[in-house]
Amino acid sequence: MVKIFISTYFFRIKSKDIFGSSVTQVKLQHQMPPIFREKIMKTKNLLENNYTRPAEFLFIGFTDDLPLRITLFVVFFVVYTLTVAGNLGLIILVHIDSSLRNPMYYFLSNLSFLDFCYSTVIAPKMLANFVASRKRISFQGCALQMFFFACIADAECLLLAAMACDRYAAICRPLLYHTLMSPRVCLGLAVLAYFSGSVTSLVHVSLTFRLPYCGSNVIDHFFCDIPPLLALSCSDTYINQMLLFTLCGFIQTGTFVVIFISYACILATVLRIKSSGSRSKTFSTCASHLVAVTLFYGTLLFMYLRPTARYYPALDKVVALFYTVVFPMFNPVIYSFRNKDMKHALTKLFKRQ
């Protein structure tokens, strides 16, 4: 009878999709008689202690069809090349043109650096796996990829919030703008973004890679993201899930609230402007940032603020592909397309050549 209970319990742990989250597993334990609970915990601890750390992980990726993989390789190689050229070009332009040396473009150059890193952490390995016979990554490589990916994602949230504060100061507090957004303040906000992203990412990675992984080392994704790795673990991942939900919720929701309040104040200020020309010009300075915020936050909130039971690998891979590889390519275009300062700086640069 005890063996039946134990085998049933471990079947339920492995079948997390049937029961939803680890909270259900904890409730099942408490509903059992004490003797069964004790036997189960002893057996569980024994099994977890016997698990060896996998030397590598294998990605399922998008498809096993070779012609389609080659097509995807060509498409995303072009996308990655444009991403690198666009973001590095924007960084160089901001640093060589004196007219762009102000808080707005300082934050924009940092955002381009993050987008370049974001894509570089994911795209090269993804491209290699498109043409490889086995789509693999080492255990340490997986941990590093997760660390940099999570760090950059959190830092980008904070940087987008800092950019919203900069727009608020420029439009709503113009007389105090140079005091509110002094070089020291801008540097402090950028350092805070990178530092906070590193700390939260380190917490996620250290807890995720301390988990025992049961048998399978196949990740149903194209990079080392947190939810697919938690799905491979045989132990209780309740703490990891709650930490993921709490930290992501705090950073993403907190920064989104800052952005929302900043733009609510900007809207109230702009509506008081009588000239329609001045009003549209003021709105245009914020439009590119609003588009970037909508794209970035929309995908992140969809991906990480859902219960674990509602992860759909096929859909999640497509969404993740957009915010890790495609969106970083569009950001330089979004910020430069209607920006007269950027166009003027580009024109001056080409005339010098």
Image (cartoon, rainbow, N blue to C red):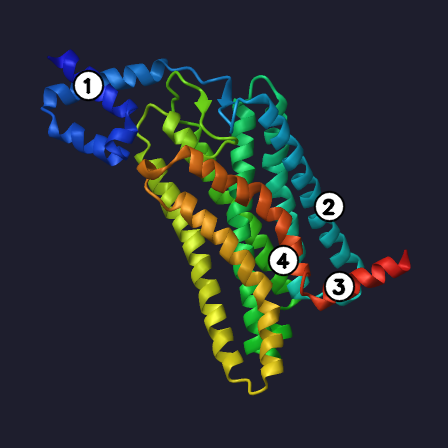
Q: Amino acid at mark 1?
A: Thr
305 displayed left or right of 163: left
Q: Quadrant of residue 116?
A: top right
How far across and how far down the image is residue 270, in percent? 53, 79
Q: Amino acid at mark 3?
A: Lys
Q: Classify 325 as above or below 126.
A: below
Give the spatial CA distance, label 3 vs label 1.
Answer: 66 Å
For disc 4, the neighbor class at 10 Å (few under 14, some 14 to 19, many from 20) is some
Q: What residue is shown with label 3? A: 343
How far across and how far down the image is residue 42, in percent? 23, 17
Residue under the image location 66 percent in, 54 percent down:
332
Determine whether the residue tagged by mark 3 lies in a helix, strand or loop: helix
125 displayed left or right of 56: right
Q: Amino acid at mark 2?
A: Ala
Residue 334 marker: 4
Q: What residue is shown with label 2? A: 85
Say whether disc 2 or disc 4 marks the residue closer to the N-terminus: 2
Disc 3 versus disc 1: nearer the observer: 3
